[in-house]
Amino acid sequence: MATEIKVPTLGESVTEATVARWLKQPGDTVAMDDPLVELETDKVTLEVNAPAAGTLTEIVVAEGSNVGVGALLGVIGEGAAKAAPAKKTEAKVAVTAAPAAAPAPRPAAAPAAASNDLMARSGPAVRKAAAEANVGAASITPTGKDGRATKADVAAAAAKPAAAPKAPSAPRALGEREERVRMTRLRKRIAERLKESQNTAAMLTTFNEVDMTEVMALREKYRDSFEKQHGVKLGFMSIFVKACLVALKEIPTANAEIDGDDIIYKNHYDIGVAVGTEQGLVVPVVRDADQLGFADIEKRIGDLGKRARDGKLSLDELSGGTFTITNGGVYGSLLSTPILNPPQSAILGMHKIQKRPVAIGDKVEVRPMMYLALSYDHRLIDGREAVTFLVRVKECIEDPQRMLFSI
């Protein structure tokens, strides 16, 4: 009896994936739960495992094709493989691949799918308002939670002057030493999110610098005993997470988000930690960081970072963060302006530790210094609050004992 291989549920708000790579070929024998194919979504790459043991008799969807949830990917048959069916399957795969490679239908299908997805996410009230205003989803810029449109977005779209339709520009001709590579779903999603952040938020960045002397001395003093007791090294990230928690509790808007005309204040602290991978930047989330000790935070960050680089993160581990920390210093960045991770209202940028001459009292000393950057949504956070936030982080880093008392 044949067993169908289907696209599993991909996670909240994710309805489509790209077949990145088939790990088995027609005629291969597979065991139950063997990885068969990798699917790339706009958040993670995930493996689809064999739902039954047998022989992969048919690949229905070729690599590079887009598929929706529940779509048929292939078929597993019983028993050992036979040469003839394998050749037939290869022919079928080739035939299936041809439409996927044809560029003509793609421009029309992608916007339609995106428009339908936006209206489906946004609810009946928004759909009704759009219908009454005769506004298409393509002209709406969503500002609600999780990329949803609001009635205010519909009204704004209705107020825009009608634009003449613009024909999609043809791909430019390649030069002698150029090559064209299709953008991955993850890279496209990163681009969309960053542009969305700039388009919807009134983003501003404030800077400060912190003397790392005390924190570095603290790490050196307790490094061996901490690792021996907890089985993990004491890094800077757990210390900065703890410092940010002190600041977030004092400045709750930095842990909040705008949802339409409302502000949602979050009394939980799920800290996103940006991780660079070969596929792009991902932000796994340390849940309930305020309830964790330094060792637990280090373990969570280490585990999430490793699985991010291995492409093993689940969608749940990449969603729902309330505040983000990014450390460009690991790549040597001395100063940068981080971009918000919507719908969050603030993000802290850490940078390279560099020895610089600084005034200590009436003397000039060489100290290990780090620039800090806080980018924030000025619609929600005032300049005074942003500066106060950075000052609290600075105070906690320069006097780590403050974190024991949350002061």
Image (cartoon, rainbow, N blue to C red):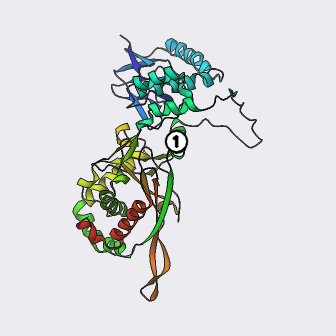
Residue drawn where x is 61% and y is 18% of the image: 99
Tally of numbered tags: 1
Tell me if residue 338 can be seen: no
Residue extending farthest top: 1
The reply, left or right, for residue 360 in relation to residue 103 is: left
Residue 262 vs residue 191, the one in the foreground: 262
Residue 43 vs residue 202, the one in the foreground: 202
Relative height, residue 74 to residue 162 (above, below): above
Relative height, residue 247 to residue 63 (above, below): below
Residue drawn where x is 65% and y is 22% of the image: 102
Residue 106 vs residue 332, the one in the foreground: 106
Find disc 1 in the rendering and name its residue: 196
Quadrant in which residue 369 is drawn: bottom left
Secondary structure under badge 1?
helix
Q: Position of residue 145 (x, y in %)?
A: 40, 37
Q: Position of residue 220 (x, y in %)?
A: 33, 73
Q: Position of residue 196 (x, y in %)?
A: 52, 41
The reply, left or right, for residue 192 in relation to residue 101 is: left
Tell me if residue 392 can be seen: yes
Identified by mark 1, the residue type is Glu
Q: Position of residue 345 (x, y in %)?
A: 42, 50
Query: In the rendered image, which quarter contains the N terminus?
Result: top left
